[in-house]
Amino acid sequence: MVEFFGGDYRNDSEALAIIFAALANNMTGVGTARDKSQYAQINTDVRELNYQELQSLPRKSRLIRRVIELFPNDAIKAWYKLKFGEDVGVDPQDVQQYLREVKGNYRQCFRRAASLGRQYGDAFILLAIADGRAPDEPVDEGRIESIRWVKVVRRNQLYPDYYGRWRGNATDPEHYRLNTIKNEVSEDENGGSTWGSKWHRDRVLRFSGDRLLDDDVITQNGGYNDSIIQAMFSAWASWEQGLAASSAMLQDYDQFTLGIKGMSEMLKGNISSKELKALGLDDDADELTKQRVVMERMYRRALMLDRGRSVVRGMMYDMEDELPGSIQRRYQGADKIMDRLEDAWAASTGIPKFKLYNQIGSTGISTGVQAATILKFEWASQVNDWADENIREPLERLCKYAMLAKDSPTGGHLPSSWEVELPLAVNLSPLEQVELQKMVAERDSKNISLGIYSAEEARRQYEKAEFDHNLVLEPRDTRDTKAPASDEDSDEEVDITHNGKGQRRSDEMRLDDATTIQRIIDWQGFKVGLQYLPFQYRHGKLLTAAYGHFQKTKGADGMALDVYVGTKLDSPKVYAIAQQINGEFDEEKMVIGVDSQDEAIQIFIKAMPPEFFGGIREMSLDELRGYRIDAADGILSDNEWEELSQISAADFVSVAEGILDVETREDLQSKTLVELKAIAAERGLGEPSRYRNRKAAWIELIQRSNK
């Protein structure tokens, strides 16, 4: 700051230019203290809508009402399917029928509560559960006799109970209190529906609008979340005002003109006797009176002309003293401004523009049957996501109580495995269904040609009463199709039947040997063929690591060594896990790409049943190389043979001397690579200068020591 003529002025233009701008211009002020853009501030004030405003806005604007109801309406239309993972002797649909018979129409309650939650921030469904306890006590799941009724209450009818000792958190308080008269809520024999009564959260299903993540903000908001109208109000108000302003501008943008001879003199009061007489004034009238009468006369004249123009689209004027005209201006850019306001308003609602305004073609996708189908699937996916976030938890809790109720079809038995499925509901016209089948047929044609599934499996889509494009395949290793075998695989057919103890036979585990290799990687001099990649299913389990085999190797079972491959391929560590079936050793499974034994165990037990784990040991790379086919049987690759064929005279003599000692060489040849290394170590011979992974090199080293 500097003092200049008694005032303080900023003198930090250079510093601001360095901080805020790559370019600075003292003449224009860009990047300097004169730059207006550097004085922007965040407005922290929030225009909080009160309850009456939230109540009236949907009545005044059909668009706001549409925003509130679109997600709940379409989600409830799709609804849900209850599924059991085991046979309990009861159809899951019977449980849903039981809930339909509960007093209060639970499906309509879900629709209404979800809509009210979006409108006011929160809405609730009270559950009258007969378990012998009062409404302010937790539900006793082991003593549920029945569900008597369900009832929707609005935000102003139920509030979180934060009085006294703090219970729970702001987003999920332990208790709520009723703020309504008894007649507005169904009767309950325990008196829990009376004004001011407490309700435990187990007996309350909560539906929120715009969820607030900060507990302090929720507490300041009375324990409630925000209405979705709150966040979009500013954008909606700007859009509405933009529409009104544009309409007014279009109406009044062109202006008419009326020229009157001597108007300026008349306004000054310089009026002739003739004109005074026409105005009804005497010559003795003062200047102020003259001016007032003239202005009033002109106002009436202009008003009359404007009315005539707007009604009859014409105008009458004095040809001698008046000269009519108009000013026409070009009105450009308003449509772009309205589009921006429309986009901002649509974005604030969380609803796609084509759905909010019930339009197709304004989203950048060309119009037509195919585009309409795509948009419908896009919307159905968003509805499904919304239902998963807002409907699933209340539904699961209600279904659980229904299955635990002793008067329900399950008789109070909760299946060990069950789920609430939220289907993707897409309502297509007949023409759109034909277009969808055409697109699916193109997909199937490509997938069948690639061998992903067969034509018979693709036919399943048409076997139901309604076409279902969702093709669900069985896990690859349990289908009866044969995959092409690799060069190490056997041509024999594999039996994948189950044994009498309900476990798969070891033959089934070897079915992977016939699974197509998807990728080959290099690791520590080995070629590893990956038959399964991470996050693919094998034996019905989702793999967390890749799975395949070491090529050109032979394990104890006569097959290539199986291996699980982690992500840390720089690690040279190898672990061998003893796989057992029915308590008996089956084979060893290698694990690479890990840093520790625990990582290897976790990969195995996530891919196979825990009872298959029979122990683990760390294996050296040298021992692993001993399983190579060329190391065990003396078979060399073309490159290795060519390299070995380059011998010197000394090498020839050494080989010739070795031939004279046939008995010794034959004895050593019968030993494994590991045993040969042990003999060399025992005699302190060190290692061969080259080809350390070949038995011939170690035999030569040992024979030379004998000489």
Image (cartoon, rainbow, N blue to C red):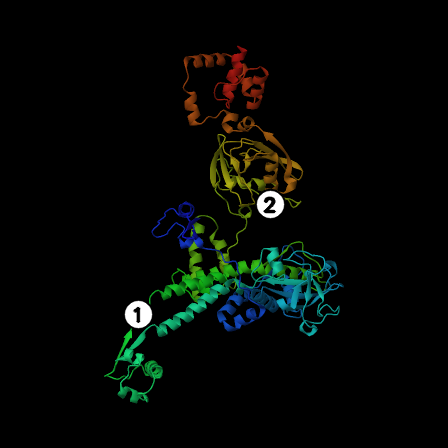
Which sits in the foreground, 311 or 213?
Answer: 311
x and y, in percent, of residue 406 in the image = 72, 63
Q: Which residue lies furthest to the top in this view?
A: 707
Identify the residue under disc 1.
329
- Residue 347 placement, left or right of 290: right
Residue in the image at 52% along x and 31% along y: 553
N-terminal of the two: label 1 or label 2?
1
218 shown above or below 701: below
Q: Are marks 1 and 2 in contact (CB under 8 Å)?
A: no
Which sits in the foreground, 353 or 305?
Answer: 305
Tag 1: amino acid: Arg
Identify the residue under disc 2.
497
159 shown above or below 85: below
- Residue 142 placement, left or right of 230: right
Q: Quadrant of residue 247?
A: bottom left
x and y, in percent, of residue 137 in the image = 73, 61
x and y, in percent, of residue 358 in the image = 45, 67
394 shown above or below 21: below
Tag 2: amino acid: Thr
